[in-house]
Amino acid sequence: MGTRRALVAFAVIGTTLLLTAVPASAHGAPTSPLSRAAACGPEGGRAETPACRAAIAAGAAVREWDNIRVARIDGRDRERIPDGELCSGGLSAYRGLDLPRTDWPATTLTAGARHTFRYRTTIPHRGTFRFYVTTASYAPDARLTWADVERKPFLSVTDPPIRDGAYEMPGRLPAGRTGRHLIYVIWQNSNTQDTYYSCSDVIFRAASRATRPAAPAASAAVPRTRSESATADAPAVPVAAVTGTGPFSRPLVVGAAVAVVVAALLAAVVGRRMRRAGGPPPGRPCGVRNHRSGRRRIW
């Protein structure tokens, strides 16, 4: 009985350590346009740029680039997130992302053009994404304040599909912007109490005549009432069906580890019961004689 209790205790402790060692608080960040956290993270490819080095030195936990989240905001973003700390979500661990610089890695986009926004997910959640653009007077060399961000989002999508490990949200970029700006993304979860914040630096180029959106024809079809993400034709995976893919598959790693621990525990308990029932002791070949009964047992 003592051995069995020890095995059970070992399995419980091992499973607990595995679950706590794998961060369960990682969830996602924009990769198109590329956010500051994702750009400076391990797979962003921009960690050696001057802006990312300065951010890390000032304090930016970019190894958890997908974890800029604040609980219990409940839509009160402008009340709860302080001016000058929008990119970090007011979290000191990411304060380096708030540095006012003109050399942050930026994505070049065409103002007013259509774009498929991608938000890389490591643990899917349900919720609403709101995309904002900075005002025409935005100055990248000054700390970002709420006054620098348009009050209305230019795109809002609820529960978009996941394709290739990222939420995909087709939409149209804001018009009337040129030069360096910032797209501010707020992801408010509906199945958790968390809200995520991110800053994506962009450079808007003016739209040519050929790429400017045409005026709708008089006979145009009735517009959809759902979000723009509903216009995508490629097959999508429902949020609830996704458990993570690729190198960020933390739920899959945890599941495999737990399965190994449970299998080892069951094997040990079954082996012990077999030996108590007269089964073959370790190292004894099958078919030897039982010294207590004198009978030969075949296993």
Image (cartoon, grey):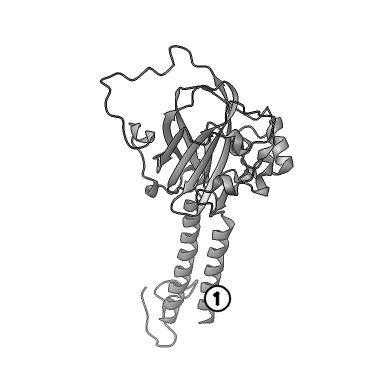
Give the image location of residue 165, x and y in percent: 45, 40
Instruction: Left or right? Give the position of 129 relative to 43.
Output: left
Of the 4 image quadrants, the one containing the C terminus is bottom left
Residue 82 placement, left or right of 73? right
For the residue carrying disc 1, how many other residues have a C-alpha within 10 Å: few (<14), some (14-19), or many (20+)? few
- Residue found farthest to the top: 209
- Position of residue 148 relative to residue 250, above or below, is above
Judge whether residue 164 can be spotted in this image.
no
Between residue 95 and residue 82, name the one nearer to us.
82
Amino acid tagged 1: Ala
Quarter where residue 177 is shown:
top right
Q: Which residue is mark 1?
A: 6
Picture residue at 52% right of the left edge, 21% below the top? 176
> For this view, does 249 lie left or right of residue 289?
right
Q: Out of 136 and 276, give the one closest to the viewer.
A: 136
Residue at 28% over, 19% down? 218
Instruction: Mark yes or no: residue 197 visible.
Output: yes
* 76 relative to 44, above or below: below
Residue 237 is situated, as x and y percent measured from the top left of the image, at 36, 42
The residue closer to the viewer here, 197 or 9, is 197
Residue 204: x and y, percent? 55, 22
Nearest the viewer among 256 and 179 is: 179
The number of callouts visible is 1
| Secondary structure at numbered mark 1 | helix
Residue 115 at what x, y percent from top left?
45, 27
